[in-house]
Amino acid sequence: MARAFTLDGTYIHLKADDSARTLEGGERFWAGIGERCDLGEGRLMGASDQGRDWDHWERHPAGDEILTLLSGEMELILDEPEGEQRVRLKAGETFIVPRGVWHRGLVKEPGRLVFLTPVPAPSIGLWTRTRRPAATEASLQGWRRPL
């Protein structure tokens, strides 16, 4: 029997063949992201609570990421070739993060965020640099790194 679910506990993998499958979401999903090889091409859709500033920078070489803030307020920092750009998101607003741009979020008021992220298998992996990314590093592989 089909059942409804929430996007914080269950993510959706929208596959390149236009089919969809559910995956266990939340912290357990992200804890094992470096070892995942089951996502293939497509997009990952989910939701997460935004209670604190992101402790990492991330980027998505395979495509644009769509972020919709359902509640709260946050500021996205984008490390673009022309310099750092900041975009304020309020409840109900959506922003498209361009392909390959390093970005992170600062929480101004706790809330909930829905993400639609490109996930080809080759771009999944942790990036373990501790300094702020530089736009000149745009050709480096990886999609996420700590501050």
Image (cartoon, rainbow, N blue to C red):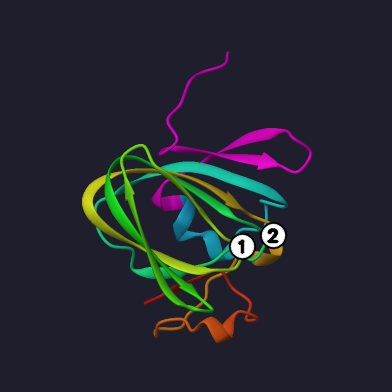
Task: State which tag comes first along the sequence, 1 or 2.
Answer: 1
Question: On the image, numbered disc 2 is attached to which residue?
Answer: 121
Q: Position of 111 compared to 95: left or right?
A: left
Please name whichever residue, 30 or 64, is drawn nearer the observer in this view of the structure: 64
Figure check: 57 above or below 25: below
Q: Residue furthest front?
A: 82
Give the magenta range.
1-28
Instruction: Give the residue furthest to the top.
Output: 1
Task: Name the kind of residue labelled 1 in the image.
Answer: Arg
Q: Residue at x 41, y 46 (%)?
A: 26
For label 2, count other residues whose C-alpha is less than 10 Å away and answer few (under 14), some (14-19) or many (20+): some
User: Is 119 drawn above or below residue 116 in the view shown?
Assistant: below
Q: Residue at x 56, y 86 (%)?
A: 136
Q: Is residue 96 left or right of residue 26?
A: right
Residue 147's spot in the image, x, y percent?
36, 77
Find numbered disc 2 in the image and state the secondary structure of the residue it sits on.
helix
Query: Residue 58 at what x, y percent from top left?
Result: 48, 67
| Mark 1 secondary-structure assignment | loop
Give the quarter of the image for residue 123. Answer: bottom right
- Residue 45, image x and y in percent? 54, 42
**Number of callouts in the render?**
2
Residue 144 magenta: no
Between circles 1 and 2, the one closer to the viewer is 1
Residue on which the image places disc 1? 99
> The disc labelled 2 sits on which kind of residue?
Ala
Residue 18 on the magenta span = yes
